[in-house]
Image: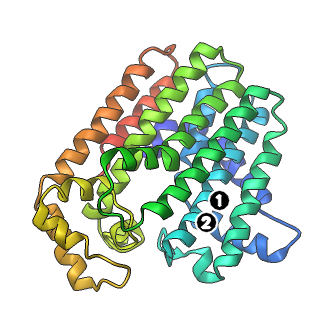
Amino acid sequence: MKFKMAYSFLNADLDLIEQELEKTVSSTEPLLSEAGLHLLQAGGKRIRPVFVLLSAMFGEYDIEKVKKVAIALEIIHMASLVHDDVIDDAELRRGKPTIKAKWDNRIAMYTGDYLFARSLEIMTSLENIAAHQILSKTIVEVSLGEIEQIKDKYDFDQNLRVYLRRIKRKTALLIAASCQLGAIAGGVPESIHKKLFLFGYYVGMSFQITDDILDFTSTEEELGKPVGGDLLQGNITLPVLFAMENSELKNKISKVASDTDETEMAEIIDAILSTNAIERSIQVSDMYLQKGFSILNQLPKNRARSALSNIAKYIGKRKF
């Protein structure tokens, strides 16, 4: 099953959200509008809005209410991408120039800040104190994740715990919040929206680990950026951590810097692929995914649960 087929019954509502996103990133300041639209038009799977909508279906589904939450969560994600590209000094995202590449770091940072502020403004339409507390906490955690990413760059002595905490803050918690806030917008009982949070967390962890694997196993065309780009930018991911258990290989990997040439990077990538690092990373991703399925099976059976299950299966079966 193709990813979008899992939730094709949401197409009309997702089209509405896409239109609303375009309006939301617009500003009276032309440069901010241009930068925001540039990022939006680069595309993306809109996974967070999909999780918001599906989770709301466990309660009373009202697209006019739920769409605000979906838009807010996607804009937070977009803001974090803009900041990430500054941190990583990234020139491309999804095969297109990043905001920092097209303009500069200052414009990128102000665009990210503007998007964060817009997300908070949009969420005021949801009159639920708990929802605002969850959103605020999530933004704090995402910000901490960004700081950790800076701190951990080119730290080849970091351990598994540091990596897992970083991807929890950078990716998993925002997906978990998407599930929980969507459910809250649908008025579901606390017992259910807490389970949806856990489901989103486990799937989010698996999703990020899978992305980190694909950074080594996909092509530049598929990634929209160079293969091994994360390592070149100093981001130490799970396959790298496992590969560095070999002391000789760790010595080679730890020499990687932002100016490492393509030939040397290609040799290092081949060396990582020759170990069992990819297979072991897939096992960790699968472990999180199975935990997600175990939570999902505790939820009421409906069309949304089936769709969430198919999405999780898709995440687990992406090409390696």
Q: Quadrant of the N terminus?
A: top left
Establish if 170 lies above or below 189. Answer: below
Badge 1 vs badge 2, beta-carbon distance below 8 Å = yes
Which SS class for mark 2? Answer: helix
Image point 57% across, 21% down: which residue? 194
Q: Residues within 10 Å of mark 2 (few under 14, many from 20)?
A: many
- Where is residue 117 shown, x and y percent of the image? 78, 54
Asked whether, in this view, residue 45 is left or right of residue 257, the answer is: right
Give 128 or 136, whichever is nearer the viewer.
Answer: 136
Asked whether, in this view, residue 304 is left or right of residue 261, the answer is: right
Q: Circle 1 sits on which residue? A: 79
Establish if 176 lies above or below 272. Answer: above
Give 61 or 229, whichever is nearer the viewer.
Answer: 229
Asked whether, in this view, residue 165 is left or right of residue 98, the answer is: left
Image point 66% across, 17% down: which residue? 188
Write down the quadrant of residue 258 in the picture: bottom left
- Where is residue 66 shown, x and y percent of the image? 72, 34
The amino acid type found where label 1 is placed reads: Ala
- Where is residue 235 shown, x and y percent of the image? 39, 63
Res 290 visible:
yes
